[in-house]
Amino acid sequence: MEERLKPMDAEQLRESAHRMVDFIADYYKSIESFPVLSQVEPGYLRKLLPDSAPDHPESLQQVLEDVQAKILPGVTHWQSPNYFAYYPSNSSIAGFMGEMLSAGLNIVGFSWITSPAATELEIIVLDWLAKLLNLPDDFLSTGPGGGVIQGTASEAVLVVLLAARDKFLSRIGKSSLDKLVVYSSDQTHSALQKACQIGGIYPENCRVLKTDASTNYALSPDLLNEVISQDISTGLVPFLLCATVGTTSSTAVDPLPALATVAKRNGMWFHIDAAYAGSACICPEYRPYIDGVEEADSFNMNAHKWFLTNFDCSALWIKDRKALIQALSTNPEFLKNKASQANMVVDYRDWQIPLGRRFRSLKLWMVLRLYGVQNLQQYIRNHIELARQFEDLVIQDPRFEVVTPRIFSLVCFRLLSPDNDGDKGNKLNRDLLDTVNSTGKIFISHTVLSGTYILRFAVGAPLTEERHVNEAWKVLQDEASKLLATIQNN
């Protein structure tokens, strides 16, 4: 009989964790045997699990058998080399070990005193990453700003919006909340809309500016200027501009220098969301895409997307940390301590929404140390090269077209309707997406640009190689041929 599992015991941990690591390693070994997109129906799991928790302990073996038989069929395999949907969510050996160590130490690092190393390592690794991205000195901890790890880009844009909101309201009066206006493009991530809802920004004061193919779906500075002028003339107060480097739909890059000029002229807070494409900017040849960041008030990129750092790890840099702290700081008696009271330390609880926080800097530190900058650059370049190869395959097949220029590792493309009918073309591509994903061989996702339904092929999973890209294209071609044959037969 298996020994009773204690809450914590070094030798039991050693034995159980070894078994778990073996289980995970075996999963990675066989990851290509699973359908990439889970094929289960909603509610499938309730039929497979009991109605209530067990009164007596079960064995780890029983639990792992259930994971294999009942949980894995309901998992969409983000780490599969045949995963090309949304944007990647990278896992790596280094990231995994950092996550493991964080779970082992299990600290709750809301103040410096609660684990000095957690705060200090975060400051150091975000300075390292800022230097890799060649961010302005104001974003370093030695300047007036600094970096902080948030859970996601959604949290980053929310705390930035709150900081900007309070900075403006302290100047023009709290009763002027109904005058504050936020500007973004219709390609900006929906996280900004959610931040506005939480931050109490009036829905009618959220300007979502239309983009089109003429700018490759980037925000037009002229249109922005025009809308801001109209708002000022009616007594409204422009306070936040959110620009994107690598939009979710099509990796559009907003023209940062021109937008920075508009923001500066109107005294607005300028935030840059580079959640996906920020990782590529550690390569000198892609760094120009964030030129203009020196004029930004805040900058965000997700190390958990394309930087081999397991979810979650979203790096946010801010030019004026005081603005963030003033918006989010609380100082209850039970958290008071000498180091904090003397202003000798950073207390990251004042840089985020929750109080508690995990030791997330460990995994970023391990990724930077165990891979090194040159390997990370090569990793990014390899994915971009694979996407370029996929783009070439699409171009060579006259039945398909590439819809927007490929900049990083996302290709936006579609199957052309034989009779050039827009509605039929949209249905055709919807059907192609469904049939391709239901094969289980690959997983891709879609977007809509100017009313046209478009397929997205995002290369970025750590295990993806050239053969996976070629096989994915073959699946797409085969399913397209079947669909087109059906149309002709009708």
Image (cartoon, rainbow, N blue to C red):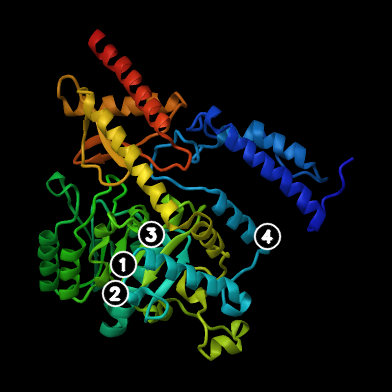
Residue matched to label 4: 104
Mark 1 and mark 3: Cα distance apart in space: 24 Å
Mark 2 and mark 4: Cα distance apart in space: 44 Å
Q: Residues within 10 Å of mark 1 (few under 14, many from 20)?
A: many
In the drawing, what numbered circle is on residue 301? 3
Residues marked 2 and 1 touching at CB (< 8 Å) = yes
Mark 4 and mark 3: Cα distance apart in space: 27 Å
Drawn side of residue 212 relative to residue 132, left or right = left
Q: Residues within 10 Å of mark 2 (few under 14, many from 20)?
A: some
Q: Nearer the viewer, mark 2 or mark 3?
A: 3
Q: Position of residue 37 (x, y in %)?
A: 47, 33
Q: Residues within 10 Å of mark 3 (few under 14, many from 20)?
A: many
Q: Amino acid at mark 2?
A: Leu
Q: Residue at x 87, y 47 (%)?
A: 3
Residue matched to label 2: 177
Q: Position of residue 182 (x, y in %)?
A: 25, 65
Under circle 1, the secondary element is loop
Under circle 3, the secondary element is strand
Q: Amino acid at mark 1?
A: Ile
Q: Position of residue 106 (x, y in %)?
A: 66, 63
Q: Earlier in the sequence, mark 2 or mark 4?
A: 4
Q: Earlier in the sequence, mark 2 or mark 3?
A: 2
Q: Position of residue 36 (x, y in %)?
A: 48, 32
